[in-house]
Image (cartoon, helix red, strand yellow):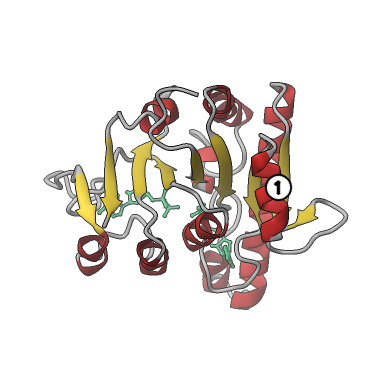
Amino acid sequence: MTGLRWKRVLVKLSGEALAGQQAMGIDPDVVGRIADDLVSAVRLGAEIGVVIGGGNLFRGAWLQKQGTDRVTGDHMGMMATVMNALAMREALAARGLKASVLSGLPIPTVCDTFTQRGGLEHLASDRVVLFAGGTGSPFFTTDTTAALRAAEMRCDAILKATNVDGIYTADPKKDPNAERYDRLTFEEAISRDLKVLDTSAFALARDNAIPIIVFSLQEAGALIEVLAGRGRATVVAG
Ligand SMILES: Nc1ncnc2c1ncn2[C@@H]1O[C@H](COP(=O)(O)OP(=O)(O)O)[C@@H](O)[C@H]1O
Ligand SMILES: O=c1ccn([C@@H]2O[C@H](COP(=O)(O)OP(=O)(O)O)[C@@H](O)[C@H]2O)c(=O)[nH]1
Protein backbone atom coordinates (compact mmCIF):
# COMPACT_ATOMS: atom_id res chain seq x y z
CA MET A 1 0.00 0.00 0.00
CA THR A 2 1.42 3.40 -0.92
CA GLY A 3 0.29 6.96 -0.94
CA LEU A 4 -2.72 6.65 1.33
CA ARG A 5 -3.13 9.29 4.02
CA TRP A 6 -5.80 7.17 5.70
CA LYS A 7 -5.76 3.36 5.81
CA ARG A 8 -9.07 2.45 7.44
CA VAL A 9 -11.90 4.85 6.74
CA LEU A 10 -15.59 5.16 7.28
CA VAL A 11 -17.25 6.62 4.18
CA LYS A 12 -20.61 8.27 4.81
CA LEU A 13 -22.79 8.29 1.69
CA SER A 14 -25.93 10.37 1.84
CA GLY A 15 -28.98 8.59 0.53
CA GLU A 16 -29.77 11.55 -1.67
CA ALA A 17 -26.49 11.07 -3.53
CA LEU A 18 -27.79 7.71 -4.76
CA ALA A 19 -30.82 9.30 -6.41
CA GLY A 20 -28.62 11.17 -8.92
CA GLN A 21 -30.72 13.64 -10.90
CA GLN A 22 -33.98 12.00 -9.82
CA ALA A 23 -35.95 13.43 -6.91
CA MET A 24 -36.09 10.05 -5.20
CA GLY A 25 -35.07 6.45 -5.65
CA ILE A 26 -31.87 4.67 -6.59
CA ASP A 27 -30.05 5.57 -9.84
CA PRO A 28 -28.07 2.47 -10.87
CA ASP A 29 -25.57 4.57 -12.85
CA VAL A 30 -24.75 6.66 -9.80
CA VAL A 31 -24.47 3.59 -7.57
CA GLY A 32 -22.18 2.04 -10.19
CA ARG A 33 -19.95 5.12 -10.35
CA ILE A 34 -19.58 5.22 -6.56
CA ALA A 35 -18.90 1.46 -6.56
CA ASP A 36 -16.10 2.07 -9.10
CA ASP A 37 -14.50 4.56 -6.68
CA LEU A 38 -14.80 2.10 -3.78
CA VAL A 39 -13.18 -0.64 -5.88
CA SER A 40 -10.27 1.68 -6.74
CA ALA A 41 -9.84 2.60 -3.07
CA VAL A 42 -9.71 -1.04 -1.97
CA ARG A 43 -7.20 -1.83 -4.72
CA LEU A 44 -4.96 0.90 -3.32
CA GLY A 45 -5.03 -0.84 0.07
CA ALA A 46 -7.71 1.09 1.92
CA GLU A 47 -10.02 -0.68 4.36
CA ILE A 48 -13.48 0.67 3.80
CA GLY A 49 -16.61 0.76 5.90
CA VAL A 50 -19.59 2.58 4.41
CA VAL A 51 -22.57 4.03 6.23
CA ILE A 52 -25.39 4.65 3.77
CA GLY A 53 -28.22 7.07 4.43
CA GLY A 54 -31.82 6.69 3.32
CA GLY A 55 -32.93 10.20 2.41
CA ASN A 56 -33.49 9.19 -1.24
CA LEU A 57 -36.34 6.96 -0.07
CA PHE A 58 -37.68 7.87 3.39
CA ARG A 59 -36.86 10.07 6.35
CA GLY A 60 -38.73 9.77 9.62
CA ALA A 61 -39.09 13.55 9.94
CA TRP A 62 -40.86 13.85 6.53
CA LEU A 63 -43.21 11.01 7.32
CA GLN A 64 -44.02 12.59 10.66
CA LYS A 65 -45.08 15.79 8.86
CA GLN A 66 -47.48 13.67 6.82
CA GLY A 67 -49.01 12.27 10.01
CA THR A 68 -47.03 9.07 10.50
CA ASP A 69 -45.85 8.26 14.02
CA ARG A 70 -42.20 9.39 14.29
CA VAL A 71 -40.86 6.07 15.49
CA THR A 72 -42.62 4.20 12.67
CA GLY A 73 -41.24 6.78 10.22
CA ASP A 74 -37.74 6.26 11.57
CA HIS A 75 -38.14 2.49 11.19
CA MET A 76 -39.06 3.12 7.54
CA GLY A 77 -36.03 5.41 7.17
CA MET A 78 -33.73 2.77 8.62
CA MET A 79 -35.18 0.13 6.29
CA ALA A 80 -34.53 2.53 3.40
CA THR A 81 -30.83 2.50 4.31
CA VAL A 82 -30.89 -1.31 4.11
CA MET A 83 -32.34 -1.14 0.58
CA ASN A 84 -29.57 1.26 -0.45
CA ALA A 85 -26.93 -0.99 1.09
CA LEU A 86 -28.27 -4.02 -0.80
CA ALA A 87 -28.10 -2.06 -4.07
CA MET A 88 -24.50 -1.07 -3.31
CA ARG A 89 -23.55 -4.63 -2.35
CA GLU A 90 -24.81 -5.87 -5.72
CA ALA A 91 -22.92 -3.14 -7.59
CA LEU A 92 -19.71 -4.04 -5.76
CA ALA A 93 -20.23 -7.76 -6.36
CA ALA A 94 -20.71 -7.07 -10.09
CA ARG A 95 -17.23 -5.50 -10.00
CA GLY A 96 -15.72 -8.50 -8.24
CA LEU A 97 -15.50 -6.88 -4.81
CA LYS A 98 -16.87 -8.79 -1.85
CA ALA A 99 -18.99 -6.70 0.50
CA SER A 100 -21.06 -7.51 3.56
CA VAL A 101 -24.15 -5.71 4.75
CA LEU A 102 -24.31 -5.46 8.55
CA SER A 103 -27.49 -3.88 9.84
CA GLY A 104 -27.97 -2.06 13.14
CA LEU A 105 -31.66 -2.87 12.72
CA PRO A 106 -31.89 -6.67 12.80
CA ILE A 107 -33.45 -8.09 9.60
CA PRO A 108 -31.88 -11.54 9.80
CA THR A 109 -33.40 -13.07 6.70
CA VAL A 110 -32.03 -10.21 4.59
CA CYS A 111 -28.58 -9.45 6.00
CA ASP A 112 -26.35 -10.01 9.01
CA THR A 113 -26.93 -8.01 12.14
CA PHE A 114 -24.18 -5.57 13.13
CA THR A 115 -21.72 -6.61 15.82
CA GLN A 116 -18.41 -4.90 16.46
CA ARG A 117 -16.58 -8.22 16.20
CA GLY A 118 -18.22 -9.10 12.87
CA GLY A 119 -17.40 -5.68 11.44
CA LEU A 120 -13.77 -5.83 12.51
CA GLU A 121 -13.36 -9.34 11.10
CA HIS A 122 -14.78 -8.36 7.72
CA LEU A 123 -12.61 -5.24 7.49
CA ALA A 124 -9.49 -7.21 8.36
CA SER A 125 -10.28 -9.68 5.57
CA ASP A 126 -10.47 -6.95 2.91
CA ARG A 127 -14.22 -6.98 2.55
CA VAL A 128 -16.05 -3.69 2.20
CA VAL A 129 -18.52 -3.45 5.06
CA LEU A 130 -21.79 -1.69 4.37
CA PHE A 131 -23.24 -0.54 7.69
CA ALA A 132 -26.98 -0.33 7.15
CA GLY A 133 -29.98 0.22 9.39
CA GLY A 134 -28.50 3.27 11.12
CA THR A 135 -27.94 2.84 14.83
CA GLY A 136 -31.03 0.61 14.98
CA SER A 137 -32.78 3.23 17.13
CA PRO A 138 -35.17 6.01 16.14
CA PHE A 139 -34.36 9.73 16.58
CA PHE A 140 -30.79 9.28 15.32
CA THR A 141 -29.27 10.02 11.91
CA THR A 142 -26.90 8.16 9.67
CA ASP A 143 -24.30 10.91 10.27
CA THR A 144 -24.29 9.96 13.95
CA THR A 145 -24.20 6.30 12.88
CA ALA A 146 -21.10 7.08 10.81
CA ALA A 147 -19.30 8.57 13.82
CA LEU A 148 -20.40 5.64 16.00
CA ARG A 149 -19.30 2.94 13.56
CA ALA A 150 -16.03 4.79 12.89
CA ALA A 151 -15.25 4.67 16.60
CA GLU A 152 -16.26 1.00 16.93
CA MET A 153 -14.23 0.03 13.82
CA ARG A 154 -11.23 2.12 14.97
CA CYS A 155 -11.21 4.08 11.73
CA ASP A 156 -8.55 6.68 10.98
CA ALA A 157 -11.04 9.13 9.45
CA ILE A 158 -14.66 9.72 8.51
CA LEU A 159 -15.04 10.72 4.86
CA LYS A 160 -18.38 12.43 4.42
CA ALA A 161 -19.19 12.19 0.73
CA THR A 162 -21.87 14.67 -0.21
CA ASN A 163 -22.99 17.09 -2.91
CA VAL A 164 -20.97 20.11 -1.71
CA ASP A 165 -17.18 20.38 -1.78
CA GLY A 166 -16.76 21.16 1.90
CA ILE A 167 -18.19 23.08 4.83
CA TYR A 168 -19.13 26.70 4.22
CA THR A 169 -19.86 29.65 6.50
CA ALA A 170 -23.53 29.09 5.57
CA ASP A 171 -25.45 26.67 3.36
CA PRO A 172 -23.91 27.42 -0.09
CA LYS A 173 -27.15 26.39 -1.81
CA LYS A 174 -28.97 29.20 -0.03
CA ASP A 175 -26.25 31.85 0.44
CA PRO A 176 -24.17 32.67 -2.68
CA ASN A 177 -21.71 34.64 -0.51
CA ALA A 178 -20.92 31.65 1.73
CA GLU A 179 -17.19 30.94 2.00
CA ARG A 180 -15.60 27.51 2.20
CA TYR A 181 -13.34 26.43 5.05
CA ASP A 182 -10.23 24.33 4.43
CA ARG A 183 -9.96 23.37 8.09
CA LEU A 184 -12.11 23.70 11.19
CA THR A 185 -11.84 22.47 14.75
CA PHE A 186 -14.68 20.38 16.15
CA GLU A 187 -15.52 23.21 18.53
CA GLU A 188 -15.79 25.68 15.64
CA ALA A 189 -17.99 23.30 13.65
CA ILE A 190 -20.30 22.80 16.62
CA SER A 191 -20.43 26.38 17.94
CA ARG A 192 -21.00 27.88 14.46
CA ASP A 193 -23.86 25.40 13.88
CA LEU A 194 -22.64 24.70 10.35
CA LYS A 195 -25.25 21.98 9.71
CA VAL A 196 -23.43 19.65 7.30
CA LEU A 197 -23.35 17.05 10.06
CA ASP A 198 -25.43 17.01 13.21
CA THR A 199 -23.92 18.06 16.51
CA SER A 200 -23.96 14.56 17.97
CA ALA A 201 -21.90 13.26 15.04
CA PHE A 202 -19.31 16.04 15.49
CA ALA A 203 -19.21 15.43 19.27
CA LEU A 204 -18.75 11.67 18.93
CA ALA A 205 -15.95 12.12 16.39
CA ARG A 206 -14.29 14.75 18.61
CA ASP A 207 -14.47 12.53 21.70
CA ASN A 208 -12.82 9.69 19.78
CA ALA A 209 -10.28 11.94 18.00
CA ILE A 210 -11.43 10.87 14.51
CA PRO A 211 -11.10 13.62 11.87
CA ILE A 212 -14.01 14.26 9.51
CA ILE A 213 -13.34 15.15 5.88
CA VAL A 214 -16.27 16.64 3.94
CA PHE A 215 -15.97 16.41 0.15
CA SER A 216 -18.07 16.23 -3.01
CA LEU A 217 -18.74 12.95 -4.75
CA GLN A 218 -19.77 14.66 -7.97
CA GLU A 219 -16.38 14.16 -9.58
CA ALA A 220 -15.22 10.63 -10.41
CA GLY A 221 -12.03 9.78 -8.50
CA ALA A 222 -12.73 12.25 -5.67
CA LEU A 223 -12.61 9.51 -3.05
CA ILE A 224 -9.09 8.50 -4.09
CA GLU A 225 -7.88 12.10 -3.90
CA VAL A 226 -9.27 12.46 -0.38
CA LEU A 227 -7.77 9.13 0.70
CA ALA A 228 -4.42 10.41 -0.50
CA GLY A 229 -4.82 13.52 1.65
CA ARG A 230 -5.41 15.73 -1.39
CA GLY A 231 -8.45 17.08 -3.15
CA ARG A 232 -10.88 19.85 -2.39
CA ALA A 233 -12.40 19.23 1.02
CA THR A 234 -12.87 20.60 4.51
CA VAL A 235 -11.02 18.79 7.29
CA VAL A 236 -12.55 18.94 10.78
CA ALA A 237 -10.08 17.87 13.44
CA GLY A 238 -8.71 18.60 16.92
N1 LIG B 1 -22.54 25.31 6.36
C1 LIG B 1 -22.76 24.46 5.34
N2 LIG B 1 -21.74 24.10 4.53
C2 LIG B 1 -21.94 23.21 3.51
N3 LIG B 1 -23.15 22.63 3.25
C3 LIG B 1 -24.19 22.94 4.04
C4 LIG B 1 -24.06 23.87 5.12
N4 LIG B 1 -25.26 23.98 5.74
C5 LIG B 1 -26.10 23.17 5.09
N5 LIG B 1 -25.49 22.54 4.05
C6 LIG B 1 -26.15 21.58 3.15
O1 LIG B 1 -25.79 20.27 3.58
C7 LIG B 1 -25.98 19.39 2.50
C8 LIG B 1 -25.03 18.21 2.59
O2 LIG B 1 -25.34 17.38 3.70
P1 LIG B 1 -25.92 15.91 3.48
O3 LIG B 1 -25.98 15.29 4.83
O4 LIG B 1 -25.16 15.22 2.40
O5 LIG B 1 -27.35 16.18 2.92
P2 LIG B 1 -28.72 15.85 3.61
O6 LIG B 1 -28.67 16.48 4.98
O7 LIG B 1 -29.72 16.46 2.67
O8 LIG B 1 -28.76 14.35 3.66
C9 LIG B 1 -25.70 20.19 1.24
O9 LIG B 1 -26.71 19.92 0.29
C10 LIG B 1 -25.73 21.65 1.68
O10 LIG B 1 -26.66 22.39 0.92
O1 LIG C 1 -29.83 5.65 13.64
C1 LIG C 1 -30.69 6.02 12.82
C2 LIG C 1 -30.38 6.40 11.49
C3 LIG C 1 -31.40 6.75 10.63
N1 LIG C 1 -32.70 6.75 11.05
C4 LIG C 1 -33.79 7.03 10.10
O2 LIG C 1 -33.35 6.80 8.77
C5 LIG C 1 -33.58 7.97 7.97
C6 LIG C 1 -32.55 8.05 6.87
O3 LIG C 1 -31.29 8.44 7.40
P1 LIG C 1 -30.66 9.89 7.10
O4 LIG C 1 -31.73 10.92 7.09
O5 LIG C 1 -29.54 10.09 8.06
O6 LIG C 1 -30.09 9.66 5.64
P2 LIG C 1 -29.26 10.65 4.69
O7 LIG C 1 -29.51 12.08 5.12
O8 LIG C 1 -27.82 10.33 4.87
O9 LIG C 1 -29.72 10.29 3.30
C7 LIG C 1 -33.58 9.11 8.98
O10 LIG C 1 -34.27 10.23 8.47
C8 LIG C 1 -34.30 8.47 10.16
O11 LIG C 1 -35.69 8.46 9.93
C9 LIG C 1 -33.00 6.41 12.36
O12 LIG C 1 -34.16 6.43 12.76
N2 LIG C 1 -31.99 6.04 13.20
Residue 201 in the image, given as x and y percentages of width and height:
42, 63
Q: Which residue is mark 1?
A: 121
Provide residue 185's location: percent of width, then percent of height.
22, 57
Quarter placement of the C terminus: bottom left
Q: Can you give x and y, in whole percent of width and height, for residue 96 in the image? A: 72, 22
Q: Is residue 218 visible?
A: no
Identify which residue is drawn at 49% across, 43% down. 9
In the image, farthest residue toward the left: 177
Left or right of residue 185: residue 61: right
Given the image, on which type of amino acid does mark 1 rest? Glu
Left or right: 88 in relation to 164: right
Nearer to me, 166 or 209: 209
Could you tell me if residue 153 is visible in this image? yes
Q: Residue furthest right?
A: 109
Give how far across and how far down residue 18 sits, in percent: 55, 39
Q: Is mark 1 within 8 Å of ligand 2?
A: no
Does 71 sit above or below residue 186? below
Q: Nearer the viewer, residue 151 or 27?
A: 151
